[in-house]
Image: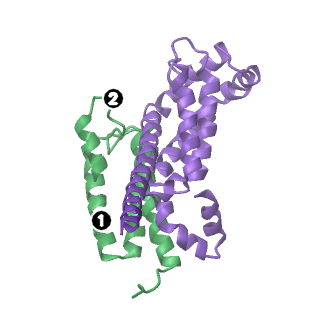
Amino acid sequence: MEAYGVTSELVVSRSLDSRLSRGAVALARIGIAFLWIQNVGWKTPRDDFGRRVGGGLYGFTKDGVDHPVFSPYASFLKHVVMPHFLFFGWLTLLVESAVGAFLLVGLATRLFALIGLVQAAAITLSVLNTPGEWHWTYYLMMIGQLFLFATAAGRVAGVDGVLRGSWQASRSPLAKALVLAS
Amino acid sequence: MACSLFRLVRGREHVQFVHFGSGGVVVLLLLGVAAVAAAIVGRAVIVAVIGVLYVAVAVVQLVQLFGRSNWFDGNASFFSLTLGLGLGLVAIGVTELAVPAGPPRS
């Protein structure tokens, strides 16, 4: 009986631990999604993403040239991004909006965690050496994306978790792609 | 529906993660109620249609980012929010239609 009691306590403890862990993973995913969603809010094409006033996204990109973190990337910003800034402004707005959107609902979460990681790395390489910036911000951004990828965070309280079984059962190429992306 | 609460913290940048006005609140509440109702009655087609409506709202917001009008008084954060909600519902509705769930096991 005692052995049975110990086993029962262990099961309850593990179940609680599992629920807490799953809740924490879901909270982290939704929290990081809202950070991306808030971060895309100030990017606006009305002033060509800050080019007309020398601020906004244009200003942060220029920081990557004025305070280089990695010289090949600074050269890429100067010779490729800055001359075609409107295109890259739109690209940034759409990529960051998509990362926030997909992470929020937990759809294709691992794919968008990786896209978010690449975007966070690009931001880091632009502004890490800018005076007044707190380097932890950028390291935490990348670590957060890695966490979401490693835990396949959309499978907890996300669309991936609801639909993955159906995608695995389907022969459709899109469903197979979504299994990989989730 | 829960996201419409962001309207209440307008002006407090540290907690206002999505920016929108009264028009945005109306859209989020109406489509939110409709999505919950569609889920309760279990109609995948309606879920997908509501998802498409959310995506349409997102597209309108995206276009209005560089126009004169701003029906939802929002910015790109409202675009991102409605895009996510819409694509999530479309994915659920379309998958349910393409791969219907089997009969419940007794």
Display colour for chain B: green
Q: Are marks 2 and 1 on the same chain?
A: yes
Q: Is residue A98 visible?
A: yes
Q: Which residue is mark 1?
A: B36
Rate crowding at label 1 as few (under 14), some (14 to 19) or many (20 or more) other CA atoms within 10 Å. Answer: few
In the picture, residue A68 is in which quadrant?
top right
| Vertical order, A57 against B66 (above or below) | above
What amino acid type is highlighted by mark number 1?
Val
The outermost residue toward the right is A72
Instruction: Assign the N terminus of chain A to one quadrant of the image.
Output: bottom left
Chain (purple)? A
Query: In the drawing, does residue A24 fall left or right of residue A177?
Result: left
Q: In the structure shown, which secondary structural element does the residue marked by tag 1 occupy?
A: helix
- Identified at 52% across, 47% down, the residue is A98
Q: Which residue is mark 2?
A: B13
For marks 2 and 1, give the CA distance.
29 Å
